[in-house]
Image: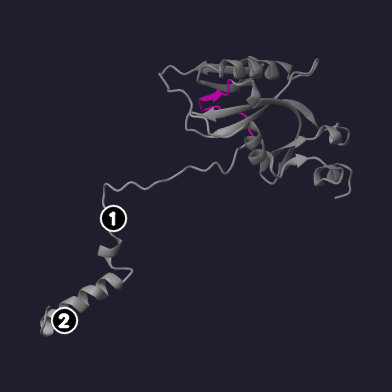
Amino acid sequence: MITGETGTDEITGHADELADPFNPEALRVATDMDVATEKVLTAVPVRKPKRDEFFRVHADDGFTLDVLAVERDEDLDRETYVVSPACADAVSEVARKVRLFTCISKRGTVFLWPAKLPIEGNSGRRYAETALKIAEEAKALWVRMWGDRGLGGYAMVRARGNIEEPKWPDKTFRELLRIAFEDRIIDRPDHPVIRELAGDL
């Protein structure tokens, strides 16, 4: 048992310091302490691969889907909408068949690539054809692609380095579709995109 003024002050002072939430000693964490974290996939961009990024395409055919899509310029961004077959006639003038490939960049960004499917007699047919060929290459190799006007299509290079295999997220294709197109699916006659095309908005 501690007696005397000095002992009592020391104990009280120590207790006050520990009670202060901003006391440095109360906030200090060991340098070797590991903090448990889990990366949560909150967004899945819908875009084609950037010309300066190496990427891979998911080799499982269950992560690829042919759909009808509509591209809309909204502010400074270009948004891609997926169209339900029931609403296809309402957007036939602006819709295009695309093949959605599940991709991942070298930095680990997962995205869906809406590669346009070739149309007979269309001026962009070679771009569409070369894009599909590159997508097949990217199922086994890290590649980079860009539009080449001289070629009239997409050019491609393979990565020289020994890049490790991609780490795909623990998500089903259905879950990726939901994240990517949660508010961008045209599935009803009164959808804003359909109403805008009809002049109702």
Answer with left or right where residue 183 lies relative to residue 14.
right
Q: Measure how far apart labels 1 and 2 are at the Cα level.
A: 29 Å
Question: What span is in magenta?
Answer: 46-59
Q: Residues within 10 Å of mark 2 (few under 14, many from 20)?
A: few
Q: Would you place residue 97 above or below residue 17 in this image?
A: above
- Dominant secondary structure (helix, strand or loop) of the stretch shown in magenta: loop
On screen, 90 above or below 56? Answer: below
The residue at 48%/42% (across/down) is: 39
Badge 1 is on which residue?
Answer: 29
Outermost residue to the bottom: 5
Residue 51 magenta: yes
User: In the structure shown, which secondary structural element does the residue marked by tag 1 occupy?
Assistant: loop
Q: Decide which of 40, 75 is in the foreground and name it.
A: 40
Q: Where is residue 155? Give x, y as percent.
A: 58, 17
Residue 28 appears anywhere in the view: yes
Q: Quadrant of residue 104?
A: top right
How many residues crowd around disc 1 within 10 Å: few (fewer than 14), some, or many (20 or more)? few
Residue 128 in the image: state x and y as whole percent: 70, 19
